Image (cartoon, coloured by chain):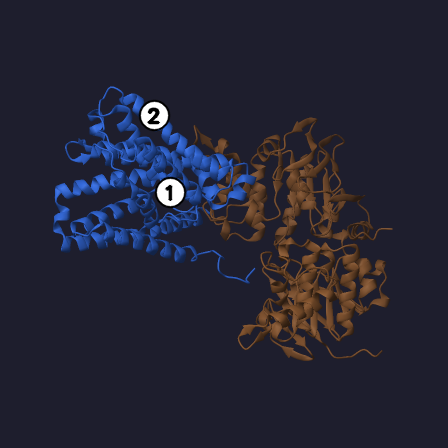
Chain colours: A blue, B brown
Amino acid sequence: MTDAPTTTTTTTTSRLSRLSSVLAPMAGLATVLLLAAVTTPQLYTPEVMRLVLFQIGIIGIAALGQTLVLLTGGIDLSISGAIALTSVVLAVTTNGSDDRLVTALVLSVVAGLTVGLVNGALVVLRGVPPFVATFASFVLIQGVIIAWTGGAPSGRIPDGLSWLGSGRLFDVIPVPVLVFGVLAVVVGVVLERSTAGRRLYATGLNRDAARLSGVRTGLVIGSCYVASSLLGVVAGLVNASFTGYVDAALVRSLNLDSIAAAVIGGIALTGGRGRIGNTLIGVVLLAVLLTWLIQLGAGGGAQLIVSGAVIVLAVFMQGRRLRIPGTTAGKKGQQ
Amino acid sequence: MTVSQRTALGAREVTKSFPGVRALDNVSFACRPGRVHALLGENGAGKSTLVRILTGDQSPDTGTVVVDDVEVALGSPREALAHGVVPVYQELTVLPEMTVLDNVMLGQEVRRRRWLDSRRQLDVVREALERVSLGEVSPTTLAGDLSLANQQLVEIARAVVRRSPVLILDEPSAVLSGDKLEALHDVVRTIAASGTAVVYITHLLEEVHELADDVTILRDGAVVSTGPVAKYDTDRIVREMVGRQVEQVFPDPPDHGAAVMLRVSSLVPRGSDAAPVDLDVRAGEIVGLAGLVGSGRSRFLRTLAGARKRATGTVELDGDTVKASINATIDAGVVLVPEERKRDGLVLDLTVSDNTTLTSLGAVSTWGLLRTQREENAFAEERERLDIKTAGPRQLTRQLSGGNQQKIVIAKWLQVSPRVLLLDEPTRGVDIGAKNEIYRIIRELAAEGMAIVIASSELAEVVGLAHRVLVFRDGAVVGEVGRNTESSEKIMHLALGTAS
């Protein structure tokens, strides 16, 4: 074929541009690792590394769901609601005994499905802005939890589940990070290689054109919200079985963390842009960053400030990158 | 009355090109003080571009704009305003959440020291509203509560307050009728009588004779005729607008079958109060839809394709009813190449191959997993058939030229082997070479037995390609014209509502 060389060139350029999108987070990760080596060498001890890996697992699972929703051009602010709801369902249903574990798991999944379906229905059928719809869900879930548990969620998580949060493969790799790894591969294959992934990207990039091409965009978007809530349930199971008790405050930051991880990795808030690799690198960067801050002795306030600043920086850089090659956005009057 | 020979607003040898299109070619134009100058031409003749240049919204490639006999360089609409050139655009710029008073005084508030002078403002607005026959409207009404016609008049009141030497009205009559139209004409006459030069763009030809003093007709970006209105009867205007060079370019379309393939009965788009539309298309037949912008062609096609909801009506393909949804319509084999290619036709940031297979993902996948080889084969096939110029299957669709992008839209539909192809403005923003290739493709597809409906505001295109042409006006079909030498003028008369 005569045009084979040109094909290779374009493939290479698209690989390059794909690489360049993870370059900034890579550089960020290297910087943080370097700074940590100087300021807090104890970060590199096995115990702390295990903590980093656990963080990667828990933030990562939530960030995978967030990525799916972000790719549709939406946002899921109810994901930590699904996580909290799961731990409460677990604790209340089993009250710490293994007998009713299966029932509790089924109920958790039903709860997650409900949250996802409500989000999806509000966004797709009623056209409610995702920010409003999912934040309303989040508040609603919190209300349900408080009303249900009398304001003080408490209770033990059955021991039969503790392997999920605290177990280790070969005594080294924490199970949460394994769960994240397996889920990341699944989500990655769906995004990169499946018809569903292609439809998702098309919907996120141009919903009108996708719809007019026969893509059932409502189904695509709704599925992403459901998937996000179900991944929230998984994250909730992992988190609850790690801590062993209901802790509503800890999970609350996972809304922000899951968004932060995806966005600093290079997933665009505008939808349709970014790949699984972006989320992976973002998750690692955020987990290392947060753990480093704890090692530095920074309080909760400083952690939030840094997370917030990193998101703003990432979105700012995305805004600049989007305008570079081949786009006419911003060049008014050229048409 | 002697006519002043001063040019209040004009253009001198203005040329303006866009990628692939020469929008204006050496256009000269002069509007005198105290005269109403009608600017006429088909859609795409260059009127809008000329107006944009006259109002400083775009700058000419060569040539100059003249204001009050002086050549000026207008860098922005603001500079044009400063020179006293006030445009009233077809798209309303009234802010619905503000009062009529605030809308009229927007950007020209009366101040005393640094504060708004409410009493003076109210007087000024009352007088302006009186002049545009809106005397009964309270200045404190929210503009959004007024009818579309009255909003248009508010817009004109805004221009009246400016008392500018030049007023440009871009199709002000499009949303007005009856009394309001009369009122508009009165306002325009008084404004002109006070010495203002008025540039008046319209599609209502009876208005031209009632109102205009001078006429300039544009065709294909050039001035074909200009002079006092007395020299122009309706027939001459239409003839000059259409031109005569049309039919030779296109060969006759291939013969078509006898059996009706697509039958549309009393279709009415939801939210439309137009008369129902019937349409039969035979296998291999090309039916053209003509009409002015806003005549309802696009809306009809989108409704037929299931992209818009129907109010009433049925669509049948080979006698089987097609349900009114986009997916059911696509599955039946009725597909639409939409008007807004970049918005509705393509996902510009996906590759050309991804766009081509978006309609037929099932065919290039196994168990939901994509097969790259099958995708690239599918694309290679269409690339060959449609002669798509691209660096390869992985090139981003955004990077292609307009013509090649349009071919990708056609390619993605050929993937589903459609029975009926609906094309809405298929050659808009496409250069002349690619245009002819798209014409060739359309003829070939018809020859293969596909039923084709093509809507276009380029008269030459519809007349040249189609076996017969339906003319739309106000959402309804007002006539059907066969393929012969007088088609263009007949269609234009029908579209303008001047048919005898």
Instruction: Residue at 73%, 65% (x, y): give it.
Output: B130
Mark 2 belongs to chain: A
Q: Residue furthest right?
A: B500
- Alpha carbon separation for disc pair 2 and 1: 22 Å
Mark 1 belongs to chain: A
- Residue A56 at what x, y percent from top left? 25, 41
Q: Note whether A182 is above or below A31 in the view shown.
A: above
Instruction: Determine crowd level at label 2: few under 14, some 14-19, many 20+ residues with C-alpha closer than 10 A.
Output: some
- Report which residue position mark 2 lands on: A107
Instruction: Determine crowd level at label 1: few under 14, some 14-19, many 20+ residues with C-alpha closer than 10 A.
Output: many
- Residue B396 at what x, y percent from top left? 47, 49
Amino acid found under the numbered disc labelled 1: Leu
Amino acid found under the numbered disc labelled 2: Leu
Dot 2 or dot 1, earlier in sequence: 1
Q: In the image shown, does A88 or B480 lie closer to the viewer?
A: A88
Give the secondary structure at mark 1: loop
- Residue B156 at what x, y percent from top left? 69, 64
Q: In the image shown, does B319 or B371 lie closer to the viewer?
A: B319
- Report which residue position mark 1 lands on: A77
